[in-house]
Amino acid sequence: MRFRMLTWNVRGANNCDKRKVIKALIKKQKVDLVCLQETKIQDMSKGIIRSLGVGRYLEWGAVDSRGAAGGIVVFWDNRVLDLVDIQRGVFSISCIFKNNEDGFMWMFTGVYGPTLRRERESFWEELGAIKGIWDGPWCAAGDFNAILSPEERNRGGRMNSNMRRFLEIIEDLELKDVPLVGGPFTWNGGVNNQTFSRLDRFLFNEGWDNHFGDVRQCVLPRPVSDHFPILLDVGGGRRGPSPFRFENMWLKVEGIKELMKSWWEGVSFNGSASFMMAEKIKVLKVKLKEWNRDSFGRIELRKNAALEQVQIWDAREKLAD
């Protein structure tokens, strides 16, 4: 099963023009489940959901804001996910889903962590209580308003008790934190926008990972808000080697035709013509896969590393301004 989820602290969804911007991003990314934090909406409605989501097949659940602060909403395509149960907390909303494609049941928890330190322990206790009622496959996402290490903020510094506590909570809840592609930070603010931190993330447990697998967490450009949208691209949980696919770009590489000819002529088999043809094709596939891995296999890794470096340079330039 392949699907896409998005989490984003939008810093208010109570403005019609802003909702149009949010909807445009959701439509562009073709996501199946969306979690928005800090909606600042006290009474979420179907009309507001339609102005945010895409298509006719939307279902939703929300934690209303407390006055002009907070608020979480989760909405999804009910052709992909069937809601089994929903639980609302002070800092979170949890939905138990059944995949319509394969019947797999799992829980999604959308969170908006408190900004006040005195409320932080209540937030951790709420997450612990959620695990107490559901010990199955679980994915949690949102603005945790916490970081795991000094590397998750541009000011650096030392490991402190708040970081250690967040790390301890993730370990207690048996959740995994996966690398972030596209940049090291998810929030930019403070005096003169000089502070960068990674406050937003997706976390999931082993049961969820074992079923879905092939997960990629990406930072997207932010058209509004001081938080960046985070996309989780779930690639279908494919296990084992990927199927062979000939890439047309290979033919543009100088010398590849001669190399393929040498591979083809370098092996021989005994048997019928069709058998020998099939066996030689198998060998050629293996050779091409090895050649592709050596020639192109690390391009994506290098590209992601370059994007992260650009993000760091961009942050430094902003600090220097």
Image: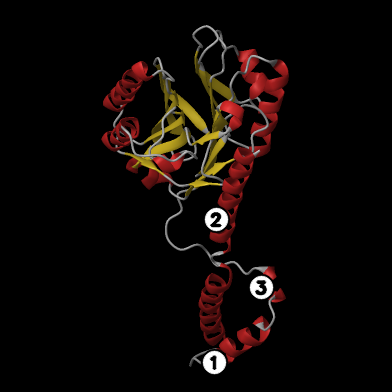
Q: Secondary structure at mark 2?
A: helix
Q: Residue furthest front?
A: 320
Look at discs 1 and 2 and give the one toward the viewer.
Answer: 2
Q: Is residue 79 visible?
A: no
Q: Residue at x 59, y 46 (%)?
A: 311
Q: CA distance from mark 3 to mark 2?
A: 24 Å
Q: Residue at x 34, y 16 (%)?
A: 118
Residue beneath disc 2: 305
Image spot of residue 202 (x, y percent): 45, 37
The mark total stands at 3
Q: Amino acid at mark 2?
A: Ala
Mark 1 neighbour class, 10 Å CA radius: few under 14, some 14 to 19, many 20 or more:
few
Q: CA distance from mark 1 to mark 2?
A: 38 Å
Q: Quadrant of residue 10?
A: top right
Q: Residue at x 66, y 38 (%)?
A: 321
Q: Amino acid at mark 3?
A: Trp
Please tell me which residue lies in front, 243 or 124: 124
Q: Secondary structure at mark 3?
A: helix
Look at discs 3 and 2 and give the one toward the viewer.
Answer: 2
Image spot of residue 83 (x, y percent): 46, 25
Circle nearer the N terminus (1, 2) = 1
Mark 2 neighbour class, 10 Å CA radius: few under 14, some 14 to 19, many 20 or more:
some
Q: CA distance from mark 3 to mark 1?
A: 20 Å
Residue beneath disc 3: 250
Cβ atoms under marks 3 and 2 closer than 8 Å? no
Left or right of 158 in this view: 75:
right
Residue 278 drawn above or below residue 207:
below
Circle nearer the N terminus (3, 1) = 3
Look at discs 3 and 1 and give the one toward the viewer.
Answer: 3
Left or right of 138 in this view: 314:
right
Q: Amino acid at mark 1?
A: Gly
Residue beneath disc 1: 266
